[in-house]
C-alpha cells in the first residue's frame, strides 16, 4: 500500500478492512491534485504514552530538566520568529527586486515605442521565472504547490501528510514563491509564508535535518507530536505575521483558522513569536530605508496607510455597505465553487506527470502575460489630474499613474493596475481621495480579469497563496460599488475598496476576527473597525449558505481525514461498536517475537492492544496499547527471553524513554531494519515496559457522537473500545480517525445518506 | 449542608466523605470574603445526557426546529449585545452626570473661597453615594461586590456559585457600580460591566426571570448548561466591549481570560455580539454629541485618542521601555500580593454582618475623600503654559488644568488628577505633548496614593473593577519613568504613561493579546503595537515569577474548585481509583421508589450509577448514570409500577425531553416538592428512560492526570470509574470536580506536598 498515490498508506486500526478503505475513499471523492497525489498520510498522536519507561523517566525528572525544557521552548519560539521574519523579509526583497527589474525593463522599452519587444521581454521574463518555479515544484517537492494553509491546517488537526514539512518543501516553498510571484501570476505570498513558517518550526523542532547533517541533540524533549504541534502553531502564526506585518492578526489567524487545539499558554507563546517577527521586520525595513536594498522601497511587505479621516457614516452609507457585503459573499462563495471545479479539472492533467505540470504552468503564464500586457490597450488615455502632488505619469516602478502607450501628461489607468506588482495594484485601489483616478470600465475589466485569473491560477504547480487574488478582486469590486454608488454615499472609494476586499475575504475564507485584525493592521486605521466587522459578518453569513470555506474545501478535496470539531447528527444514532469492524489483532503481554513480526508485516496498523493473560492474571484483561514504532525499537534491541517470563526490569535498564521518542517523519526504525534470526522468532519479548497502560477507552455502547468528541478533543490516534458485558474478550476493537469519517460511516450505513 | 455558608453545599459524588470534604476545605484555605461567604456552589454539567428521552427527541427533531434554534441563537446574541450596550451607555451616562455634578458643585464653592464647605459637600456627596452602594450590595445582593470577573471565570469553568447571575445581582451590579464609581472610589466600572454582561446573558438565556414574572416559553433549546455557557461567554465579551468600546478586545478577553472552553463557532457569535455593542454605543454617543445628555460629553466611555506621531525609537528608548516593563511587573505582582492580604483581612470584618460591611465602606469613602481633597494642598501652583490652546485653568468639569486653590492663571496639577473622575485622570496622564504639565513630585504622590487606595478599596462591599485602579497607578508610574528618563529617550511622556499602564496590567492580570488589543482600541494608535507587546511580555514574565494573576488568586481564595487546563505533575503517579473513595450508592435499573427517596434524602449527590441486574441481564452491568434533577422530575410524575417490570415506553409517552431540561438556578423540582405516599414507597420505577447510557468512563487503572484532562476537556460533572477485572461490581466509583482538587489529593496523599 505504501506509496500508492491515491490511497491512504496508513492504517491505524488493528483491523483488516482494505475493501472498506477503498469504498470509503470513493465515497469521499478524494482526488489527486498537485502536491497531494504523492502523499501517504499518517495520523499524529497527541496522547501521552504512559508506559513504564515514561513513568520511570517522569519520576527521575529533575527541576533542572523542567527548567531546561522551558528555556528551550522559549528559545525555539524566538528562533521560529527570527527565522520566519528573516525569510519573510528576504522573500519580499527578492520579489520587489526581480519583479521591479522586469517591469522597469518593459516600461523603458515602451518609452522608446518598442511595443513588440517590450511584450516579448515582459512575457519572456515571466515565462522563465514561471518555468523555474514549476520545475522546482514539480520535480523536487510537489507538496510545495498551492497555498499550504490547508496542509498546515490538516497537520494541526492530526494528519501528517508525508513531506509536507520536509526541508525540501521549505526550500521549494521559499524560492518557488519568490519566482512565482515575480512571474506576475495572480498569486499571493501569504499562504506560502504560513507554510514556510510551519516548515521552519518543524525543522527547528526536529533538531534540524539529519539528511543535510544539521542536527541538535539536545532537543529530545520536543520529540513528540504534542510539542511539535505547538511549535508548528507558532510557526503558522509567525508566517501570517511576516506576510502581513500583522503580529496580532497572525496569532488570531492561527487560532481561528489553522489550529484544532488551543491552550491559553500557547496564546502567549504564539504572541511572543509574532512579536519577534514584527521586531525583525521593523529592524530590516529600517535598514532598507536608506536605499541599500535595491528596488525594495515603499513596496514589498504590504502596509496600506489608508487612514481615511472620514469616520462618520449615515444610513445610506450603511445600506450600501450591507449591499456590498451581501454581493461580496455571493462572489466569494462562487469563487470557492469555481476554484474547486478548476482544481478537479487540473488534477486530471497534473496526474500525468511532472512534465505536464510544467506545461500547464507555461500555458497559464502566457495567458497572464497576454492579459497584463494586452488588456491595457483597451483603456483610453486619461489626462493627469492637475492638482496632483505625485508625479504623473509615474516614472519609477510603482505608483498610481502608468504612462503605457499614452502621450506625455496622460496615463493609462488599466496599465496602472495590470503592469504592476499585485501589492502595488492593491495599494492603488485602496488609495483614497482619488475618486476619478480609475474609470468604471477600467475597474470592471480589471475585476473580471483578476477574478478569472485568480481562479485558474490556483492549482498549478507553483506555491500560490489565495489572499492576494481575493484581495485584488475584492478591492476592484469594492471600488466599482463605490464608483457606482457615487453621490449616494459620502464614503471614500478607497474605503469602499477596502470593504470590498473584506467582503471577498469573508466570502471565501470565512474568518471573522482574524481577518478583521489583519485588515486593520494592514491599513492602520482602527476607525473602520465597525464597518469592517459588519461587512465580514454579512459576507460570511451569506457565503455560508452556499458552501464551505475555501481551505476546508481543499482539505476535503485532498482527502485528508479531517476531524471536525462537532459530531455529525447521525452519529447520535450509532454506538461505538457499530463502526468497529474486522478481526482484531492483539498481543499477549509476553508475546512470541515471530507473532509480533508477522503482525507488523501483514498489517499496516500502528497500534495493537495488549492483553494480560493467565498465568499472570486470573482472567484475560486489557493491559494497554502498544505502538508499532515502539515495537520496532524494542525488537531492534533484542531483549528476548527463551521462556514466557517477566523481564521488564531488564528492559527498563537497557532502554530509556528517549529511545522511544518520535523520530522525524520517515526517520524511525523501519521493519526492514530488523534482523531477526529464525531462532529469535521463537523467543518471547515482554511488552509491559512499552505498553501504554492508560489508553483512553469507551464502552462499546457509547454513542458514536460522544466517542468522536472524546477522540477529537483529546487529540487521540487510537481509542480502545471495551465490551459492556464480561463474558467476552477484554477488548472489542480500536477506533481511529478513519472510523469517524462520514464517508466511512455512510459506507457502512447507507441509509444515513438520505435520512440526514 | 445546604446553606451552610463556608462550605460546599454541593457534593457531586455518590460517596459519603464528609470528613474528607472538611479536610480538603481546610487545606485549600478557603476563606469567606464579601460575596463568597453566602454562596453554595454547584457544578455545571456540559455532557449531553443521552438517555432514551433525548434520543426520542433527537430522532423527531425536524429541520424547522434546527432552524428555529439557529435563529434564536443569533437573536439572543443580538439581544445580549443590545442589552449590554445599553446598560454600558446608561452606566457611563449616569456616572458622568452624578460625578460631574458633584465635582462642579465642589469647584464652584472653591471658586468662592469656601474651602471648608467645599470639602463637606465633596465628602458628603461621596459618603451618601458610597452608603447607597454599600447598602444595596450588603443587603440585597452580596454577590455583586467586587469585580465579578473571577465569578464569571469560575462559572465558565463549570462552577455555579449561587445567585452569581441572578436578577438581583444584575440590578445591584448596575446601580452599585454607578454609585460606587460616582462616589469617587478608586474603582473601575469595567469588571462590573463584564459581570453585568454575563448576568444579562444568563437572564436572557433562562427566558427571563420567573420570580419577576418575565418569562419566555420558547427558549427550551437553551435550558441546558452548554448553551448557557455559550451565551454567558458572549455576555462577558459584550461587557468588555461595552466597558472599553473595544469590540475585538472583548472577544479576546473572553477567549484568553474568562472562558475555559472555546469553539471556533463561538468566536464568530461572540464577535457578532461585540459588534452589536459597538454599533449601539456609537449610535448613542452620536445622539449625545448634540449635548442632550447633560454632562456626558467627551468623558465617559474611555477612549483616549493618543495618536502620537512619534513612531520611531532607538536603543536607549528600548532599554528604558524594558526597564519600565520589569519594574512594572514587580509592582504588578506586589499589587496582587497586597490585594490578597487586604482581602483576607477584610473578610474577617465582613463576616460580622452587613452592618460591618457598610461601616467599612464608610471608612474607605472618608479616607478617599480626604486624600482627594487634602493631598492637592501639598502641590505648588503652576502658571499656565503660554502656548496653550485649551483654556487654563479649566472652567468646566474635565480638563487638564484644575484651578483648585490657586490664583487665576495658575493651576494645581495634583488637583487635576485627584479632583476628577478616574477616566479623566487617565486621559490627563495619557495626554501627549505635555512634558511639563505634571511635576515629578506630583506624579510620585499621586502614584503612591492611587496604588494604596486601589489596594484597600478592592474587597469592600461595592461593585469594584480592577482595571481602572491598575491603569491609574500604571499610567502615573509610566509618566514618572518618562519624566525621570527625560533626555535619555525621545519618546513622549504620554506614551510612557500608556506603556506604564500596560506594564501594570500585564503584571496584575497576566493577559497578553487581549490587553494589547484593548489598549490599542482604547488609544487608537496601531503604531505602538510593538512597544506594547514588548512591555506586556516582559511584565507578565517578571510577575509570573512571583505569584498568580489577580483573578486566579481571587478564584482560589473564594474556594471555587477551579479545574486547571493542565494536570498537576504528581497526578501522573496516581491512578483513578486512588482518589475514589466509598461507599458508592447505586440504583438498580428498576428501583424501589423508597430506596431512591432515601438516597436523595441522605446524600447530597447529584449523580447515581444505574446497574442493570438479573433477571434483565445475565450479570450485573453498568447501564449508565442518572441525575438527581431528573430523578426528582420522574418521581414527581409518579409513573410507578407495583412489580419490577419494564415500563419505559409508558414513561416515554408521558414525559418529553423538555420536562427534564435544566431549570434556572434554584427553580427545579425540589425534594420537598415530592409527595410520596407510604404505598408508593414500596412501588418500583423504571429508570431506563432517564438513564444516560453513554456516560464517559475511565478504567480504574487510568492515570489520574489523564482522567483529569478528560474531565476538564469535555466539561464533565461525573466521570464513572469502571473496574479492570471482571469479578467485581460493574462500577468502582465516580470522580467529580472535587476529587481532582489539589487540596483533596494532598489530603489523601500528604507525601506529595514535599515531593512535588
Image: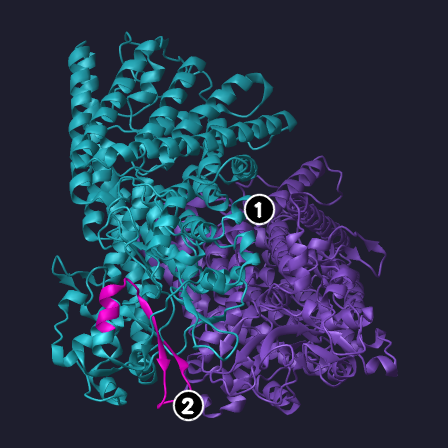
Chain colours: A purple, B cyan
Quadrant location, the N terminus of chain B: bottom left
Is residue B343 visible to us here? yes
Magenta residues? B596-624
Marked residue chain, label 1: B
Crowding around mark 2 (Cα neighbors within 10 Å: few <14, some 14 to 19, many 20+) is few
Q: Closer to the camera, A521 or B724?
A: B724
Residue B198 in the image: above or below residue B65: above
Q: Position of residue A400 (x, y in %)?
A: 60, 49
Looking at marks 1 and 2 on the same chain, the residue that comes earlier in the sequence is marked by 2
Is residue B295 visible to us here? no
Tell me how far mark 1 sits from mark 2, CA to CA.
47 Å
Residue B81 in the image: above or below residue A722: above
Q: Which mark is residue A331?
A: none
Q: Position of residue B281 (x, y in %)?
A: 30, 46
B617 falls in the magenta region: yes
Q: Which residue is mark 2?
A: B618
Q: Position of residue A547 (x, y in %)?
A: 48, 75
Q: Which mark is residue B755?
A: 1
Amino acid at each position: 500500500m505504501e506509496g500508492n498515490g491515491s490511497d491512504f498508506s496508513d492504517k491505524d486500526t488493528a483491523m483488516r478492512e482494505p475493501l472498506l478503505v477503498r469504498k470509503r475513499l470513493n465515497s469521499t471523492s478524494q482526488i489527486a491534485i498537485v502536491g497531494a497525489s504523492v502523499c501517504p498520510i499518517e495520523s499524529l498522536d497527541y496522547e501521552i504514552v504512559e508506559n513504564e519507561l515514561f513513568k520511570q523517566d517522569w519520576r527521575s525528572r529533575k527541576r533542572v530538566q523542567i527548567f531546561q525544557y522551558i528555556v528551550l521552548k522559549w528559545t525555539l519560539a524566538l528562533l521560529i520568529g527570527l527565522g520566519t521574519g528573516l525569510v519573510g523579509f528576504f522573500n519580499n526583497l527578492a520579489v520587489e527586486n526581480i519583479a521591479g527589474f522586469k517591469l522597469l525593463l518593459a516600461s523603458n522599452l515602451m518609452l522608446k515605442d518598442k511595443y513588440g519587444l517590450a511584450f516579448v521581454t515582459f512575457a519572456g521574463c515571466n515565462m522563465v521565472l514561471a518555468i523555474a518555479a514549476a520545475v522546482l515544484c514539480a520535480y523536487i517537492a510537489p507538496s510545495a504547490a498551492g497555498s499550504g494553509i490547508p496542509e498546515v491546517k490538516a497537520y494541526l488537526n492530526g494528519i501528517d501528510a508525508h513531506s509536507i514539512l520536509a526541508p525540501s518543501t521549505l526550500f521549494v516553498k521559499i524560492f518557488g514563491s519568490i519566482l512565482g510571484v515575480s512571474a506576475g501570476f495572480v498569486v499571493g505570498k501569504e499562504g506560502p509564508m504560513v507554510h514556510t513558517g510551519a516548515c521552519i518550526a518543524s525543522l527547528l523542532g526536529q533538531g534540524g535535518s539529519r539528511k543535510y547533517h544539521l542536527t541538535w541533540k539536545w532537543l529530545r524533549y520536543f520529540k513528540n507530536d504534542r510539542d511539535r504541534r505547538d511549535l508548528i502553531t507558532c510557526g503558522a502564526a509567525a508566517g501570517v505575521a511576516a506576510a502581513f506585518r500583522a503580529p496580532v492578526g497572525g496569532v488570531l489567524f492561527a487560532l481561528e483558522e489553522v489550529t484544532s487545539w488551543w491552550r491559553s499558554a500557547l496564546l502567549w507563546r504564539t504572541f511572543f513569536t509574532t512579536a519577534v517577527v514584527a521586531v525583525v521586520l521593523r529592524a530590516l525595513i529600517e535598514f532598507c530605508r536608506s536605499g541599500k536594498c535595491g528596488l525594495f522601497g515603499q513596496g514589498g511587505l504590504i502596509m496600506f496607510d489608508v487612514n481615511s479621516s472620514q469616520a462618520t457614516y449615515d444610513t445610506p452609507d450603511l445600506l450600501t455597505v450591507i449591499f456590498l457585503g451581501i454581493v461580496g459573499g455571493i462572489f466569494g462563495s462562487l469563487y470557492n465553487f469555481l476554484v474547486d471545479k478548476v482544481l478537479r479539472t487540473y488534477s486530471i492533467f497534473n496526474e500525468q506527470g511532472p512534465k505536464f505540470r510544467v506545461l500547464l504552468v507555461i500555458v497559464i503564464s502566457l495567458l497572464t502575460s497576454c492579459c497584463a500586457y494586452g488588456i491595457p490597450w483597451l483603456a483610453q488615455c486619461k489626462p493627469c489630474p492637475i492638482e496632483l502632488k505625485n508625479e504623473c505619469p509615474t516614472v519609477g516602478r510603482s505608483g498610481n499613474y502608468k504612462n503605457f502607450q499614452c502621450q506625455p501628461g496622460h496615463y493609462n489607468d488599466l496599465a496602472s493596475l495590470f503592469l504592476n506588482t499585485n501589492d502595488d495594484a492593491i495599494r492603488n485601489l485602496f488609495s483614497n481621495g482619488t475618486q476619478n483616478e480609475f474609470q468604471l470600465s477600467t475597474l470592471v475589466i480589471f475585476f473580471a480579469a483578476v477574478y478569472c485569473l485568480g481562479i485558474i491560477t490556483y492549482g498549478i504547480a507553483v506555491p500560490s497563496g489565495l489572499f492576494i487574488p481575493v484581495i485584488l478582486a475584492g478591492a476592484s469590486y469594492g471600488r466599482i460599488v463605490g464608483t457606482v454608488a457615487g453621490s449616494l454615499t459620502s464614503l471614500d472609494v478607497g474605503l469602499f475598496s477596502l470593504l470590498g476586499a473584506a467582503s471577498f475575504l469573508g466570502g471565501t475564507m470565512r474568518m471573522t476576527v482574524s481577518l478583521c485584525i489583519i485588515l486593520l493592521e494592514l491599513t492602520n486605521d482602527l476607525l473602520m473597525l465597525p464597518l469592517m466587522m459588519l461587512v465580514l459578518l454579512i459576507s460570511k453569513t451569506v457565503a455560508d449558505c452556499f458552501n464551505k470555506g475555501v481551505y476546508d474545501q481543499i482539505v476535503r478535496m485532498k482527502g485528508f481525514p479531517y476531524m471536525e470539531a462537532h459530531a455529525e447528527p447521525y452519529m447520535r444514532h450509532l454506538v461505538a461498536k457499530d463502526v468497529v469492524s474486522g478481526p482484531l489483532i492483539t498481543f499477549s503481554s509476553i508475546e512470541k517475537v515471530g507473532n509480533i513480526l508477522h503482525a507488523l508485516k501483514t498489517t499496516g496498523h500502528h497500534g495493537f492492544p495488549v492483553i494480560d493473560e493467565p498465568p499472570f492474571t486470573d482472567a484475560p484483561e486489557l493491559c494497554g496499547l502498544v505502538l508499532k514504532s515502539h515495537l520496532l525499537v524494542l525488537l531492534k534491541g533484542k531483549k528476548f527471553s527463551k521462556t514466557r517470563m517477566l523481564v521488564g526490569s531488564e528492559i527498563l535498564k537497557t532502554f530509556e524513554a528517549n529511545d522511544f521518542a518520535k523520530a522525524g517523519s520517515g526517520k524511525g526504525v523501519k521493519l526492514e531494519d530488523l534482523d531477526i534470526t529464525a531462532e529469535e522468532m521463537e523467543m518471547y519479548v515482554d511488552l509491559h515496559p512499552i505498553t501504554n497502560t492508560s489508553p483512553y477507552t469507551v464502552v462499546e455502547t457509547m454513542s458514536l457522537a460522544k466517542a468522536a468528541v472524546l477522540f477529537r478533543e483529546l487529540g487521540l490516534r487510537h481509542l480502545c473500545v471495551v465490551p459492556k458485558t464480561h463474558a467476552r474478550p477484554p477488548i472489542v476493537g480500536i477506533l481511529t480517525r478513519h472510523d469517524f469519517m462520514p464517508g466511512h460511516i455512510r459506507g457502512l450505513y447507507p441509509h444515513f445518506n438520505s435520512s440526514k
